Image (spheres, helix red, strand yellow):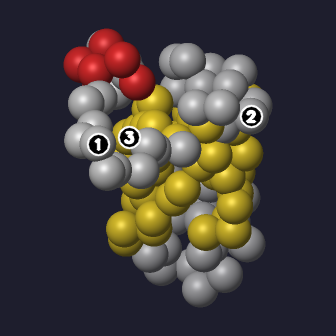
Amino acid sequence: MSDDYHIHAENITLGTNNVSPSHLPVAGGSIDWSGSGTSLAVSAPGVLTSDIVMVTQLTPSDQPSAVFSHAIPTANTVTLHLEGADSTNTSSHQYIVYRGLN
């Protein structure tokens, strides 16, 4: 992922009465499910284990149990987990990773 997709704290200007942000987005992307399983790891350069991942399931699987469950950030990787296997690889997701500033 190029640096064009990163927001850096030093580039944010706030007015005198604004609240400073506590977290900034550091990575994000779209994922079309593959591998037919219940988890899928995707490369996310710069992601840390202490980051927060938010995921939206854009397209549901045609497998009723393959609903999004949770995501786990690790070094340079985001792993998405489903409640059940998406054996037909029909779901798609978007994710954004936030990092605390403090």
Tag 3: residue type?
Answer: Gly
Whole-number angstrom distance, CA of label 2 to CA of label 1 = 30 Å
Q: Residue at x 36, y 17 (%)?
A: 10
Q: Residue at x 38, y 40 (%)?
A: 29
Tag 2: residue type?
Answer: Ser
At mark 3, the secondary structure is strand
Q: In the rendered image of this protein, does residue 58 appear above or below residue 12?
A: below
- Between marks 3 and 2 in the image, the one whose residue lies nearer the viewer: 2
Q: Residue at x 54, y 44 (%)?
A: 22
Q: What residue is disc 1 on?
A: 16
Res. 54 image quadrant: bottom right
At mark 1, the secondary structure is loop
Whole-number angstrom distance, CA of label 3 to CA of label 2 = 18 Å
Q: Residues within 10 Å of mark 1 (few under 14, many from 20)?
A: few
Residue 71, percent from left and from top: 67, 52
Return the residue found at the far front. Answer: 16
- The numbered mark, 2 or 1, whose residue comes first in the sequence reads 1
Picture quarter with the C terminus? top right
Res. 27 image quadrant: top left
Q: What residue is disc 2 on?
A: 50
What mark, if any, has residue 29 been given in the picture? 3
Whole-number angstrom distance, CA of label 1 to CA of label 3 = 33 Å
Res. 79 image quadrant: top right
